Image (cartoon, grey):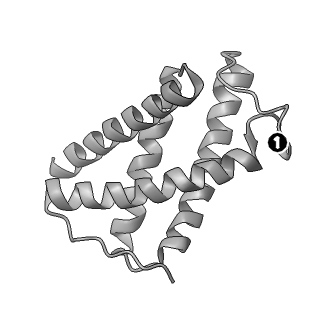
């Protein structure tokens, strides 16, 4: 039950943070971004916890970027292409794939992932008495 509570809390925090980020920088968001942000935030915490925070931060960021980019692509195909919700379209940006993912946003999201990795680790430590995360640059 503790683990379910922990993951639901992290999901809600991550969803709220990402939804708020979009509101501030885009002026609008969509409920699907809350769900996606929450899933990604939980992944940030789980990948660190499973590996006992022993991987260097740059490797964790790369792992999380692959996850975030994959989830963004899958979510984009579902909400934008199949359901025609038109939540986002990167077609006008360079190096995009079907308008759902693109290199410039992958770079932006890497910064958000770095913050999310650190924040999720410390939230688990402070609130759920999980092992204290240790972050190594190299």
Q: Is residue 104 left or right of residue 93?
A: left
Which residue position holds label 1?
97
* Position of residue 60 measured from the top left corner of the image (x, y, whole percent): 50, 68
Instruction: Give the residue displayed 48% in from the left and 59% down from the top.
Output: 114
Relative vertical location of residue 25 with respect to residue 66 in this rendering, above or below: above
So how many labels did they put on this image? 1
* Position of residue 92 measured from the top left corner of the image (x, y, whole percent): 85, 31
Q: Is residue 83 left or right of residue 129?
A: right
Relative vertical location of residue 76 with respect to residue 57 in this rendering, above or below: above
Relative vertical location of residue 89 with respect to residue 11 in this rendering, above or below: above
> In terms of image quadrants, where is residue 54?
bottom left
Q: Is residue 50 left or right of residue 21?
A: left
Q: Is residue 90 left or right of residue 121?
A: right
86 or 138, which is in the foreground? 138
Considering every residue shown, the one lying at the far bottom of the view is 138
Within 10 Å of the Cα at label 1, are there few (<14), some (14-19), or many (20+) other Cα atoms?
few
Q: Mark 1: which secondary structure? A: strand
* Position of residue 77 measured from the top left corner of the image (x, y, whole percent): 70, 31
Instruction: Give the residue displayed 29% in from the left and 71% down from the top.
Output: 133
> In terms of image quadrants, where is residue 131?
bottom left
Instruction: Give the residue displayed 68% in from the left and 40% down from the top.
Output: 73
* Position of residue 88 measured from the top left corner of the image (x, y, whole percent): 69, 26
Instruction: Give the residue displayed 59% in from the left and 57% down from the top.
Output: 65
């Amino acid at each position: 039950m503790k683990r379910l509570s922990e993951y639901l809390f992290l999901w809600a925090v991550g969803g709220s943070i990402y939804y708020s980020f979009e509101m501030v920088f885009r002026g609008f968001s969509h409920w699907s971004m809350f769900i996606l942000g929450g899933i990604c935030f939980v992944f940030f915490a789980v990948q660190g916890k499973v590996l006992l925070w022993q991987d260097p931060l740059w490797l964790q960021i790369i792992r999380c970027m692959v996850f975030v980019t994959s989830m963004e692509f899958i979510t984009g195909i579902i909400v934008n292409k199949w359901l025609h919700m038109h939540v986002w379209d990167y077609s006008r940006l360079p190096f995009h794939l079907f308008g759902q993912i693109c290199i410039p946003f992958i770079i932006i999201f890497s910064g958000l992932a770095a913050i999310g990795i650190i924040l999720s680790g410390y939230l688990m430590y402070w609130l759920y008495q999980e092992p204290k995360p240790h972050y190594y640059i190299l």
